Image: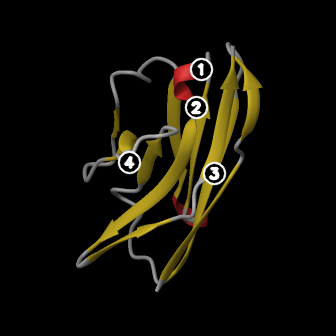
Amino acid sequence: QVQLVESGGGLVQAGGSLRLSCVASGTIFSINGMGWYRQAPGKQRRDLVAAITSGGGTNYADSVKGRFTMSRDNAQNTVHLQMNSLKPEDTAVYYCYLPTPGVTYWGKGTLVTVSS
């Protein structure tokens, strides 16, 4: 069993920054594939924000490239999402996820609100 716990969300003005963290605990073989999705208010779909690739690199959604940076701490099974130059359209619940063979684990989410 794997648990994911996000932290770091909050209210920030447009142009500001926030840093999200996600800690994975339990039986974890690799955090490759670990990443972030977000769900904007009133929308049912979760959109990919950033994720570690199988090769160890990072993929970003076009909407956050150049503003968001994902980093990892393998020893701590932790990933971070540094979000700069935030925009009101970045307002969403941000979910951490970890795909494993057979099941994908999700955190409960952390709310990011960007005021204009």
Residue kind at label 3, given as amino acid type? Thr
Place of residue 18 in the rendered image (x, y in percent of width and height, measured from the top left): 69, 32
Residue 91 is marked as 2
Marks 1,2: beta carbons within 8 A: yes
Q: Residue at x 46, y 86 (%)?
A: 1
Q: Earlier in the sequence, mark 4 or mark 3?
A: 4
Q: Earlier in the sequence, mark 4 or mark 2?
A: 4
Residue kind at label 4, given as amino acid type? Gln
Q: Earlier in the sequence, mark 3 or mark 2?
A: 2
- Mark 3 sits on what residue? 110
Marks 3,2: beta carbons within 8 A: no
Looking at the rendered image, the disc whose residue lies closer to the viewer, 4 or 2, is 4
| SS under mark 4 | loop
Using a 10 Å C-alpha cutoff, classify the residue at mark 4 as few (fewer than 14 neighbours), some (14 to 19) or many (20 or more): few
Place of residue 114 in the rendered image (x, y in percent of width and height, measured from the top left): 67, 25
Place of residue 34 in the rendered image (x, y in percent of width and height, measured from the top left): 40, 56
Q: Is residue 14 above or below residue 43?
A: above
Q: Is residue 59 above or below residue 86?
A: below
- Mark 4 sits on what residue? 44
3D distance between C-alphas at marks 3 and 1: 16 Å
Looking at the rendered image, the disc whose residue lies closer to the viewer, 3 or 1, is 1
| SS under mark 2 | loop
3D distance between C-alphas at marks 4 and 2: 14 Å
Using a 10 Å C-alpha cutoff, classify the residue at mark 1 as few (fewer than 14 neighbours), some (14 to 19) or many (20 or more): some
Which residue is nearer to you in this view: 51 or 43? 43
Q: Earlier in the sequence, mark 3 or mark 1?
A: 1
Q: Earlier in the sequence, mark 1 or mark 4?
A: 4
| SS under mark 1 | helix
